[in-house]
Amino acid sequence: MARARDPIADLRRIAFLLERANEATYRVRAFRSAAKALAGLPAAELTERAGNGTLTELSGVGDVTARCVAESLAGEEPVYLRRLVATEGSDLDAEATALRAALRGDCHTHSDWSDGGSPIEEMALAAVELGHEYLVLTDHSPRLTVARGLTAERLRRQLDHVAQVNAALPEGFRILTGIEVDILADGSLDQDDDLLARLDVVVGSVHSGLKDERSKMTRRMLKAVANPHLDILGHVTGRMVSSRPAGVTGPGDRGHRARTRAESDFDADAVFAACAEHDTALEINSRPERQDPPKRLIRRALEAGCRFAINTDAHAPGQLDWQRFGCERAALCGVPADRVINTWSAEQLVAWTHNRP
Ligand SMILES: [Zn+2]
Ligand SMILES: [Zn+2]
């Protein structure tokens, strides 16, 4: 039987690309040892085992490598390989543009109620001009005092205010209520439960203790992800790849003034598995100085089955247009539109946040 692809070559190619991307050795080794184990197998047996799902009985062959082999034997480029190749920097402009066009709103934005530079009304009007159907307002929570985080009392007032603003906005657009709630040192969320339950969308982020040691940070994130109020895990690694972007000055960007900062250390596979289990979306933060998560982690979250939210974390109206940066990175990693929660309508989004397990 003629075969369109050589599965062993595909496994080796994957190993090579993982190495070039500086991935952990054990990930590379998984593909190399599978290639080695399968290279000694007669072609007929390989096809038979791929057909009846017994490849994983061979030592050195796991679920992921077996799936790659089955796809290769079927004549398809393995999905795993395709994502890796895409991340290598081929031109995916069309995909990024299509993804951006599919977005109907933004789930992470700030106003001058916390550390943003503009009133809620201005942020909303800029979102209308961009063609959004909704904007989720996610000002900071109480403990983030440097960013004028909202107390429960101020947040209640903000909810009343948003209702008034919404009444005056054009038909077909609305501000959804929300918060960027701090994930505290013990993994709990920095706002009253009754308020979190009342909000349309809850983004949770780590803003303190970013250098927590690995097991502590992992526990902290796992507890937050398991919290039924948390809908979206914000800028997961906390990294800063550059100082504030050119042209962004003034009080509108407090809290994002940090210089370069390393990624927090945590067990990404465990956190992403928990996100998939609890149906908590992982944010792809579009801010140029954040670019968080890095592409290698977006790819792993995709493999883990996570949903994503492509957000701007805008602190000023012009920054609402930064979504295209996040789309570019998502498209490079092969994130399909149907895994992105802000391709949904406001109704679908709110139905999801209120009915998640
Ligand atoms: Zn934040
Ligand atoms: Zn933010």
Image (tube, rainbow, N blue to C red):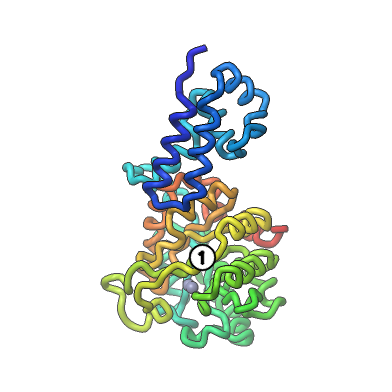
Q: In this view of the protein, can residue 249 be seen by the observer?
A: yes
Q: Is residue 167 left or right of residue 187?
A: left
What's the residue at 63%, 84% (across, down)?
152
Q: In this view of the protein, can residue 347 be seen by the observer?
A: no
- 255 shown above or below 317: below
What's the residue at 58%, 37% (across, down)?
60
Binning the other alpha carbons within 10 Å of mark 1 as few (below 14), some (14 to 19) or many (20 upward) gives: many
What's the residue at 59%, 86% (across, down)?
151
What percent of the width, then of the height, locates residue 267? 57, 61
What percent of the width, then of the height, locates residue 149? 53, 84
Report the quarter where the C terminus lies.
Answer: bottom right
Number of residue marks: 1
What's the residue at 60%, 78% (across, down)?
184
The residue that mark 1 highlights is 236
Nearest to the observer: residue 311 or residue 21 = 21
What percent of the width, then of the height, locates residue 242? 33, 69
- 178 shown above or below 21: below
Cβ of mark 1 under 8 A from ligand 1: no
Q: Is residue 266 left or right of residue 255?
A: right
Q: Amino acid at mark 1?
A: Val
Question: In the structure shown, which secondary structural element does the residue marked by tag 1 occupy?
Answer: loop
- 344 shown above or below 107: above
- 351 shown above or below 92: below
Nearest to the observer: residue 59 or residue 168 = 59
* Quarter occupied by residue 82: top left
Outermost residue on the left side: it is 246
Nearest to the observer: residue 191 or residue 22 = 22
